[in-house]
Image (spheres, rainbow, N blue to C red):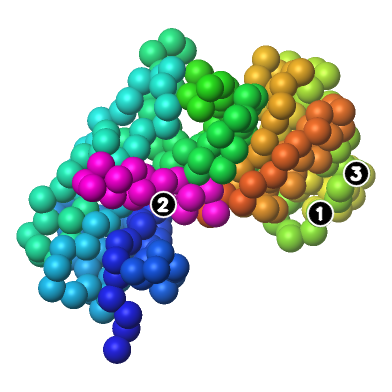
Amino acid sequence: MPELADWIAVDWGTSNLRAWVFGPDQAVIARLGSDRGMGSLAPDAFEAALLDLIAPHLGDDPVPVICCGMVGARQGWQEAAYVTVPCAPPGAGQATVVTASDKRIAPMILPGMQQGTPADVMRGEETQIAGFIAQHPDFDGVLCLPGTHTKWARISAAEVVSFRTFMTGELFALLSGKSVLRHSVQTPDWDEAAFAEAVGDALGAPQNLASRLFGLRAETLVNDMPAGAARARLSGLLIGLELAGARPYWLGQRIAVIGDPALSALYETALGHQAVPVERADGDAMTLAGLRAAYESWKGNRT
């Protein structure tokens, strides 16, 4: 028989659903996942999708389920309104409580964060930030969270002061998969020197990006540039462009990068070439730390 849950942490994104089941001793007893992300579900289908995953770990009493991510979007299970920066990352006290039909679960959804000027939003990354702050309460600097939409967040006194979003990951996916460049970059190969050079090119002359992008295709046709070099240059140009725009966030600041190890390594390399030292933290570990902090806060308020 599967062990029963004391509580469950859930990271529910657009494409995937992940859950960590905790036992009474607060150790993870199961790591679960499915491809039933927010983007594939109608609002009335979320509860069933969650139960399909976690039901073997439920008993008769209601189990707290702390959720973060796109599950709280307007198109999600139930909208969890944004909190406005500057403020601490939202915790259980600001969570939206969902009334489930199945009384074995007591779901709550953590809100995202918003910024008025310039307008910006995040949903999911705030939980990673909360996890990082829980482990580094005295951190004063900037967090970079690479992904489809990379976030740069100023942190001071355990609060998010401001943040900016860059669509670098989505641009890479579109250009490498949908544009004429797809014919030049379809390979798992990688050229580290080409990546570093492209970062410097984009940082030094971001106004030339559109021309340099087409140059990747031209180089493969005219000079037989290898696909691995083209792919690395594409990534470097886009990350370099991002660094040019985010310069006020990273220049002269303490920087920590939170995310997938492979993607975080690219940002560490790019920043390293600008003589910027970088601390690293695993994105999944920080998500789980943030959800755990929310649960501990919720539990503390009930005692």
Q: Position of residue 102 (x, y in %)?
A: 10, 64
Q: Which residue is mark 1?
A: 190
Side of 164 relative to 303 (left or right): right
Cα gap from disc 1 to disc 3, whole angstroms: 9 Å
What kind of residue is marked 1?
Trp
**Tag in front: 2 or 1:** 2
* Element under disc 2: helix
Q: Are marks 2 and 3 in contact (CB under 8 Å)?
A: no
Characterize the local packing of mark 3: few (<14), some (14-19) or many (20 or more) Cα atoms within 10 angstroms: few
Q: Are marks 2 and 1 in contact (CB under 8 Å)?
A: no
Identify the residue at image location x=53%, y=48%.
286
Characterize the local packing of mark 1: few (<14), some (14-19) or many (20 or more) Cα atoms within 10 angstroms: some
Q: Position of residue 221 (x, y in %)?
A: 83, 45
What kind of residue is marked 2?
Arg
- Tally the marks: 3
Residue interval drawn in magenta: 285-303
Q: Is residue 160 above or below residue 282?
A: above
Viewer-proximal residue among 2 and 199: 2
Q: Mark on residue 193? A: 3
Cα gap from disc 2 to disc 3, whole angstroms: 40 Å
Side of 114 relative to 221 (left or right): left
Q: Earlier in the sequence, mark 2 or mark 1?
A: 1
